[in-house]
Amino acid sequence: MTKRWSQKIEPDKQVVEDLSKSINLNKVLTGILVQRGVKTFDEAKKFFRPQLTDLHDPFLMKGMDLAISRIDEAMDKNQKILVYGDYDVDGTTSVAIVYMFFHQRYPHIDFYIPDRYTEGYGISFMSIDWANNNNFSLIVALDCGIKSVDKVAYAKQRGIDFIICDHHLPGEEIPAAIAVLNPKQKDCTYPFKELSGCGIGYKLLEAYVKRHMLNTKEVELHLDLSAVSVASDLVPILDENRVMAYYGLKKLKSNPNNGLKALLEAYPEKPEFGVNDIVFFIGPRINAAGRIADAKDSVRLMIAETAEEAKEIASQVNQHNNERRLFDQNITEQAFGLIEKDTDFINRKSTILFHSEWHKGVIGIVASRLIEKYYRPTIILTESNGMATGSARSVDGFDLYGAIEECSELLDQYGGHTHAAGLTLKLENLPKFMEKFEIVVSRNIIERSLTPEIEYDMEIPLRTITPKFYSVLKQFAPFGPGNLNPVFMSKNVWDVGDATIVGNNHLKLSITQEEGGRIFKAIGFGLGEHYDKVSEGRSFDICFTIEENHFNGHVNLQLNIKDILFR
């Protein structure tokens, strides 16, 4: 697929000059800092050396005081508390940390994860009936609930109070819960708006510790799970998210939760962990339980009190993940087949596919796979409980949630973010919805959003890359949305003659930029199509990131090539 290359806005030269002198750093790396909003010595210190004391006072969040008071009341009166969360990584990690924290000091507490297939996303009437039948008086809902106006009212009629801890966009009406913790509420002045659902749960625990003057280490114990949430839910790794990810990744390496440790036994030994280790290994396994079987297995894994218990559950979770992969592969191939048969597809600005027998648990993954190939706003739907249910994914620069909202009269339920959403509708409304969604996308999407973009930070000569340069670059981590791994561009490079195709169409090569200059090992995943031109000795431009390649005990710098442009 052809990609657009664009360079980030050049930073102010004087700001770069001043900061470079004050922190004694070369101007290339200083320029990248300035591009990311780091312009002073103090801001650079906070960026490179985040501290747990940088976390904001949890009581600045609207509703926090009411939430802690209601939890105290429940514990004083021996009322039963139910910790409730969604079935994805963010929801299950949220439930795990809140349940573990309070279970240590209060016996009348349990957790609940809705079933993806019988209850669907978020708070369900079925769960409230279950809570009522089991005499729960308080439900703490995590990573969901901000739009559950009717569910909260239904619970209130049955004498059940709600505390909602959510980070999704609120609707026009806020549920009548005892407390609603969500920095995205219009009248909430909390200084950071982009916490994950688990991040809101973490702030709840911080507030409880502060109110009762407990040791902060009782909350910090759960930073590894908070980091898993931050990485998996793709929230910006800025401000508090950066702090939690920074310390959570360190804990993941040195002293992980029993459940995470059991999962990592099947993972190659590494000197340190990064966000990608969570995104590509830990997150999919935690998610798999809710996709294939019961997400409660993921919570049980994370709250396991012994290594033996954790190993047993981890084995089940890994099996769920293997099944998930098979479903993912088969459905993706079927989806590609449907598109290839559709002669009108080339003229559309969106991708919408429906198949009544596709597995509900993996349709979101399939939507992401289709975007990788076709790069259009995508919705994949299947049938569940007599309804059409779907997962949607977007492309950069297009508000997917807003487009779905424009079709709301055809939907029974929907929710999500700008880039990802879920929806449910009656089967008979499906043709009209497909038609209208395509009209809405065609009207609102700009042409450049239909071509993937590689945005690079700086153009550099390859000789800039030294071990010292990379040692500083590593300290820009953790990388993720809002603080992506810096992408560089270098012109007029060539392969020295050992280009080869490895694995599934990956291009492996050794490149240089000047006669007699340093030779860099490089890998271009999925770029095998360029082999013939590269092996002819032609010069080309590259966009790339820099990484360490660990192999047989040796560590070497390697360029991870994102795209190639021949001169």
Image: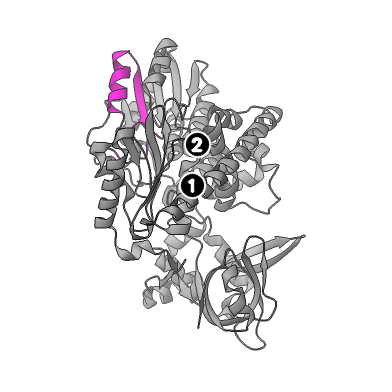
Residue at the extreme bottom of the image, as rendered: 515
Q: Amino acid at mark 2?
A: His
Q: CA distance from mark 1 to mark 2?
A: 10 Å
Pick the residue in front: 502 or 248. Answer: 502
Circle 2 residues within 10 Å: few <14, some 14–19, many ≥20: some
The answer to which image quadrant residue 182 occupies is top left
| Magenta-drawn segment | 144-170
Image x and y of residue 352, in percent: 38, 47
> What colour-coding does the image apply?
one colour
Residue under label 2: 359
Above or below residue 70? Residue 301 is below
Image x and y of residue 159, in percent: 32, 13
Q: Residue at x 48, y 33 (%)?
A: 87
Is residue 411 shown in magenta?
no
Secondary structure found at label 2: loop
Residue under label 1: 366
Q: Residue at x 60, y 39 (%)?
A: 321
Identify the mark at residue 8; answer none if there is no mark: none
Label 1 vs 2, first from the N-terminus = 2
